[in-house]
Image: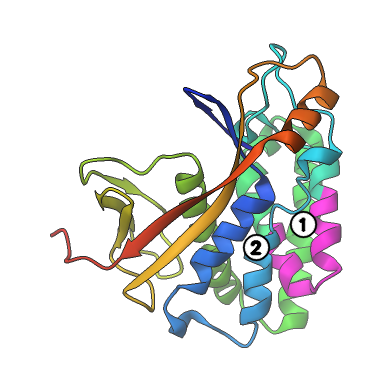
Amino acid sequence: MIVNYTITGWEIITQRAHGLLAAQIAAQWEYNIRTERWIETLLAIAEHDDAQVELERDNLLTPQGGPVNFKMKEFEQRHCTQTMDFALSKSRYIALLCSMHLAFVYGKECADNPDAAKFMQAQRLLQKKWRKVLGLTAAEAQRDYRLLEWCDALSLLLCQHENQPEGRTIEISKGPKDCAYQLVQPGAGNLTVEPWPFEDERFELYFETRLIPQLSFKNAAEFRSAFRAAKVSEKRWVFKKEKPLH
């Protein structure tokens, strides 16, 4: 889960809500990115974090009793295996993109974690096998994955309130065209991306958040109870194409 500390308590965005936002972003991308596997691409983007179900796990709290933010977690075999089981039950293409994402997220841990290294080695072999049977080159698979990674990155920026005020920019990622994209907030409630990669010149994005006033919890069960009782709100942003910054 994505955890933000606010003046009124913990703001919680679930991993699945973050994935749904990422898919909303992908759906707005300029149409020339779409291949015959476009629906599968959207599903992979929406579901790349679906194995993270907050109410089904017990490792939800820090030693101080606060909710664990996703950045605090390291490689977890069960999560990665379940992610791939979920993906492969849909299609090999979705499994390919999800496998590439796990490698992106956890690849750096392989040097110090034998379990992670073994898992990732197996994934590299599977990726090669799936590309072959799907008739995809490594470059084509990388292009499709870069869209997933870009939408994931922008979704995380929005969920973590990392958009900068007063027109300052923050880098998103390279994307499928391998160029630098910047997120800019020209005004209250409005955002833009430079260069503009979307089909429409104006659209809205939204995601659900939960606010939990209680700051610490005795155990995961107490947190889950507070999570279920929490008020759910929708955060909305308007994206508009603006004149280039330079």
Q: Does the magenta stretch include residue 87?
A: yes
Looking at the rendered structure, the kind of residue marked 1 is Gln
The residue at the point 21 percent across, 46 percent down is 167
Looking at the rendered structure, the kind of residue marked 2 is Ala
The residue at the point 79 percent across, 73 percent down is 92
The residue at the point 55 percent across, 59 percent down is 22
**Residue 211 seen in the current view:** yes
Magenta stretch, main secondary structure class: helix
Where residue 168 sits: x, y (%)? Answer: 23, 43
Dividing the picture into quadrants, the one containing residue 21 is bottom right
The residue at the point 16 percent across, 58 percent down is 245
Q: In the rendered view, would you say 170 is above or below 91?
A: above
The quadrant of the image that shows the C terminus is bottom left
On the rendered structure, is 144 left or right of 183?
A: right
The quadrant of the image that shows the N terminus is top right
- Few, some or many residues within 10 Å of mark 1 (<14, 14–19, 20+): some
Give SS at disc 2.
Answer: helix
Give the total number of marks visible in the rendering.
2
Q: In the rendered view, would you say 83 is above or below 94?
A: above
Estimate the spatial distance between the alpha carbons at disc 2 and disc 1, rounded to whole Å. Answer: 21 Å
Q: Which of marks 2 and 1 is nearer the N terminus?
A: 2
Observer-nearest of 211 and 165: 211
Q: Mark 2 points at which residue?
A: 46
Q: In the rendered view, would you say 48 is above or below 59?
A: below
- Few, some or many residues within 10 Å of mark 2 (<14, 14–19, 20+): many
The numbered mark at residue 123 is 1
Observer-nearest of 244 and 234: 234
Where residue 91 sits: x, y (%)? Answer: 80, 74
| Residues rendered magenta in the picture | 81-99
Give SS at disc 1.
Answer: helix
Extreme residue toward the left, this view: 246
